[in-house]
Image (cartoon, rainbow, N blue to C red):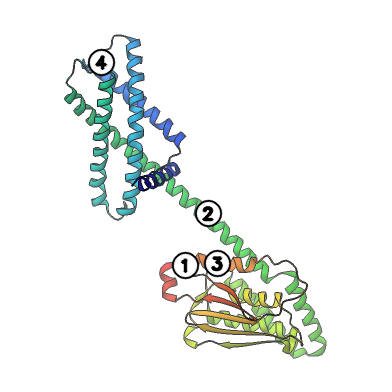
């Protein structure tokens, strides 16, 4: 039983400290305790309920009352914050207003009544209320604590709403920044100097040997960059568009590598309207050619197929002996781009002599209903 209590306390205080750091809560409760005591003491003196003997008596009562009110404030604040967190999950304001409002009001008054009774009894033990009936004092304090706790609960609700909106805005800004960075990295990976240099070298050689093939090379080259510019701002692309891009991309690579680079595609027509992040295939294909030997002795073969609603890209492994340290940035960005549009995640695994990239295909209906 004690372990459950300890876990409960840990969860409660962790949640409270996230919303209200102890230092901020302490300052708020001190101000509230002193303010309430000044109002109560002055009102009691003016009404004749409890007369003051002088300034010293006032300050002594203020000190004693503020300390008791501060204790009561902490005893009230933590249950209040727990109630708010619990009701936010079980009866959110936007969904269950008619259920939440009376329930929260009852709990607010109930917490105030319990704490008011305990604090009044403690105060009576410290200094007995000689001239007043303890029962009437308890009732009066319950009314005061109830009103104060309703105000405190409203302040907490306002603060939490402000805190959550600020947090959501920060998350949105952070997400937008990350999205822009991902777009930049994707675009940069397409227009990197190596790709441009290799493509222009191939084109230079073709112009002198085969004008028609050179023209075809230019057409496919321009198609690649047109596709990049068209899709860089889009969250998703259809599998059909990605396959068209892939054929243009591999056409350029095959002119460079010749028959040493081959590929096979086996995709049912019914899946061509499924979605995936744009340029996903380019990331995987570039990864295959970047890390593997591609020559006459060791040709590279790439197979593109589906397994259910998952696109599978498979290539034989023949790693380059001397290569730079891989940052894995392209694959990391691909995972992030999937996270922006779906709960599905790509998988990258190594089997016997083969490397597999599995890219989930997103149903158009799911995409329309989930992505904003």
Q: Residue at the right extreme?
A: 208
**Label 4 with label 3: CB-CB less than 8 Å:** no
Quote the CA–CA distance across marks 1 and 2.
20 Å
Tag 3–tag 2 contact (CB < 8 Å)? no
Circle 4 sits on which residue?
A: 45
Residue 278 in view of the camera = no
Closer mark to the observer between disc 4 and disc 1: 1
Whichever of labels 4 and 1 marks the residue nearer the N terminus, that label is: 4
Left or right relative to 241: residue 295:
right
- Identify the element where label 4 is drawn: helix
Identify the disc placed on residue 42: none
Q: Is residue 34 left or right of residue 287?
A: left
Q: Residue at x 65, y 67 (%)?
A: 328
Q: Position of residue 236 (x, y in %)?
A: 52, 72
Q: Nearer the viewer, residue 200 or 334?
A: 334
From where the camera sits, is residue 314 visible? yes
Residue corresponding to mark 1: 343
């Amino acid at each position: 039983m004690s372990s459950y209590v300890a876990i409960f306390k840990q969860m409660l205080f962790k949640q409270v400290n996230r919303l209200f750091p102890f230092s901020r809560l302490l300052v708020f409760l001190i101000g509230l305790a002193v303010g309430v005591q000044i109002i109560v003491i002055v009102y009691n003196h003016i009404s004749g309920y409890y007369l003051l003997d002088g300034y010293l008596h006032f300050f002594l009562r203020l000190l004693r009352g503020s300390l008791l009110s501060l204790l009561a404030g902490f005893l009230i604040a933590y249950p209040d914050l727990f109630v708010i967190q619990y009701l936010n999950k079980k009866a959110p304001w936007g969904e269950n207003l008619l259920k939440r409002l009376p329930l929260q009001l009852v709990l607010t008054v109930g917490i105030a009544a319990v704490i008011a009774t305990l604090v009044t009894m403690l105060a009576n033990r410290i200094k007995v209320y000689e001239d007043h009936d303890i029962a009437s004092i308890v009732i009066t304090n319950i009314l005061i604590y109830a009103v104060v706790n309703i105000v405190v609960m409203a302040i907490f609700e306002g603060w939490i709403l402000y805190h959550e909106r600020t947090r959501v805005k920060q998350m949105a800004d952070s997400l937008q920044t990350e999205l822009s960075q991902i777009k930049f990295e994707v675009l940069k990976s397409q227009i990197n100097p190596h790709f441009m240099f290799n493509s222009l070298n191939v084109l230079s050689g073709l112009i002198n040997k085969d004008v028609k093939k050179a023209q075809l090379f230019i057409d496919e080259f321009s198609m690649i960059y047109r596709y990049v510019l068209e899709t860089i701002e889009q969250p998703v692309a259809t599998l059909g568009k990605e396959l068209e891009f892939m054929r243009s991309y591999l056409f350029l690579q095959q002119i460079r590598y010749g028959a040493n680079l081959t590929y096979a595609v086996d995709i049912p027509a019914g899946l061509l309207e499924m979605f995936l992040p744009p340029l996903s295939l380019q990331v995987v294909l570039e990864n295959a050619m970047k890390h593997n030997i591609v020559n006459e002795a060791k040709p590279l073969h790439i197979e593109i197929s589906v397994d259910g609603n998952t696109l599978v890209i498979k290539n034989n492994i023949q790693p380059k002996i001397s290569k730079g340290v891989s940052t894995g940035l392209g694959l990391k960005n691909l995972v992030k781009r999937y996270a922006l549009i779906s709960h599905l995640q790509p998988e990258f695994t190594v089997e016997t002599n083969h490397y597999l990239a599995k890219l989930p295909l997103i149903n158009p209906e799911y995409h329309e209903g989930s992505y904003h």
